[in-house]
Amino acid sequence: MKRTRLLYTSALFGAALAGLPAISAAAEINIVREVDSNNYDPHKSTARAAAEVLFMVGDTLVALEPDMQTLSDGLAESWEVSDDGLVYTFHLKEGVQFCDGKAMTADDVVYSFKRWIDPETSSPVAWRAGDVEDIVAIDDRTVEYRLSEPFSELLYQLTQSFATVIDQDNVEALGADFGINGFNGTGPFCWEGWTPRDRMIMNKHDAYVWGPSFYENQGPAHLDRVVWQIVPEENTRTVALITGQTQITQYVPAIALEQLRSTPDLEVYRGDDAFWTYFMGFKVDKPTVSDEAVRQAINLAVDQEAIAQDLFFGEVEPALGYISQATLDWDPSLDSELLGYDPERANQLLDEAGWVRGGDGVRAKDGQRLAPLAYVFAGSTWQKISEAVQADLLEVGVDLQIQAFDATVAWGKMGTQEFDMFGMSYPYVSAGDALNLYFRSENMPSPNRMNWDDAETDEWLQTGKTALNDEDRSQAYSKVLHKVHDAAVWLPLYHEPMYIAQTTDLEPVVPHNNYGSGLYKGLDIRFRSE
């Protein structure tokens, strides 16, 4: 490993840095990240890259503190919930403005949420708004959010970027280009321009003074300008930090963490309140992977411990479960039932299921080669992961085919029926948050890309979602966890903590894990010289 790191260090300084903009002022920073979003419409993108920008150019009614448990004020200064859990009343802060200077009122909140749940919007995350009966503006500063059924996690969902308050005039003026050619938000930064797969530029919103109270600075932002730069290559991102061409990033290659920790002018911060899991899912109604024995064998054939150590230098946690065992409502009884690395058992399962090795070592059954097609994101992370999985599977006779797409294309491709497996990573705060996202039948074909269509799962998810006490919620989600793990619907890979690397020119930043957006609103990013 030491030799590998030495070779890597030498390679860093030969990496090209072309394309990174020069910093022209003390209050301007570059942030490098691995992939871009498909768009920046809060109702139409589930990408972490979208959330990273939307949290800065927009605001939500409710905010989440860095501990990922405590709710805080956002655009709403306070709220009440009725005893039956059906009515939420939000009281808005005074003086909130969009970037164009227009006052934000309760009507903007109502418009934003109704657009979110409108079937014509076709939002893949409309379920996160709950079962809405109506949303009304009582007056300019009061919003009443009425549910037809209780939703135990509504306030958490309203902290997500999908619940960003938007400007109706801006949406109607831009039409299909909303979130592509512009975005008029209320956040601490304002949209300047986006060049897909290259950079997003935003400028300080001078009028902004309504940030969440857990920030020491509620606004305006300390920074005048932020440039989000897409840099897929790990080497280039790392050398950009070392040479000061970027001041901060959460996209830190695991192989470089040890080196960055020992670099004099850099600091690395780790956030352990992060629930972010990498996995590969199976489209369970497609040939080959529709066979449960195949899915179980694939789980048994992949060595997650080796992936964590060899690819990520022990900086991530190997995953056998679909969510972290530290997550709210994880069922500890599942621990002994999870499928660990056992290639001998994998071979046995495939033999028993009638998948026979051919002369090239690849298995087949009834004329069908065991060669599932996997869609993954382009970039160094998924390239390494998918190639490691591919090598392990070939050892048991599974010839995994890999097709990688740039993020601006991948989200659309993964909403199709063209593939057998897919690579994904996702954030969550609880078992219910994770399970309702991926396993509801109504969420097919995306984000339920597995086509998991099961009446019992839907029933239990609904029970957990509408529960008014912890015990009922936990029991319902436990049933779902057992069922989807037993069916081997996913191949879990690893759980990733939050790392932020920054130059010592900046004051230390507290990692924030909401939807994996480590810098959240960016209100605490400032140069030490200020």
Image (cartoon, rainbow, N blue to C red):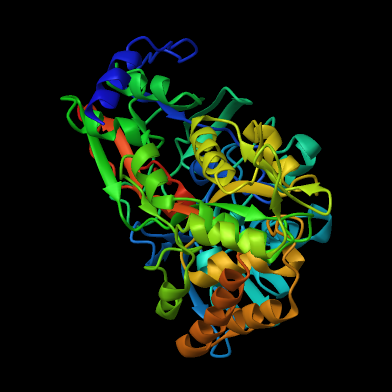
The residue under the point 78% across, 60% down is 285
Q: Nearer the viewer, residue 464 or 207?
A: 464
In this rendering, the count of numbered labels is: 0
Q: Quadrant of residue 83?
A: bottom right
Q: Nearer the viewer, residue 480 or 177?
A: 480
The residue under the point 29% across, 18% down is 7
Q: Is residue 109 visible?
A: yes
Q: Nearer the viewer, residue 153 or 289?
A: 289
Which quadrant holds the N terminus?
A: top left
Q: Quadrant of residue 383?
A: top right
Query: Does 251 sit above or below residue 436?
Result: above
How far from the left and from the top, in percent, is residue 498? 36, 47
Image position of 369 (left or right of 54): right
Q: Quadrant of residue 524?
A: top left
Query: Does 328 sit above or below residue 11?
Result: below
Q: Is residue 179 visible?
A: no
Q: Nearer the viewer, residue 421 or 224?
A: 421
Image position of 452 (left or right of 278): right
Query: Does 297 sit above or below residue 178?
Result: below
How far from the left and from the top, in percent, is residue 489? 63, 63
How far from the left and from the top, in percent, is residue 419? 75, 46
Query: Does 381 sit above or below residue 484?
Result: above
The residue under the point 48% across, 59% down is 93
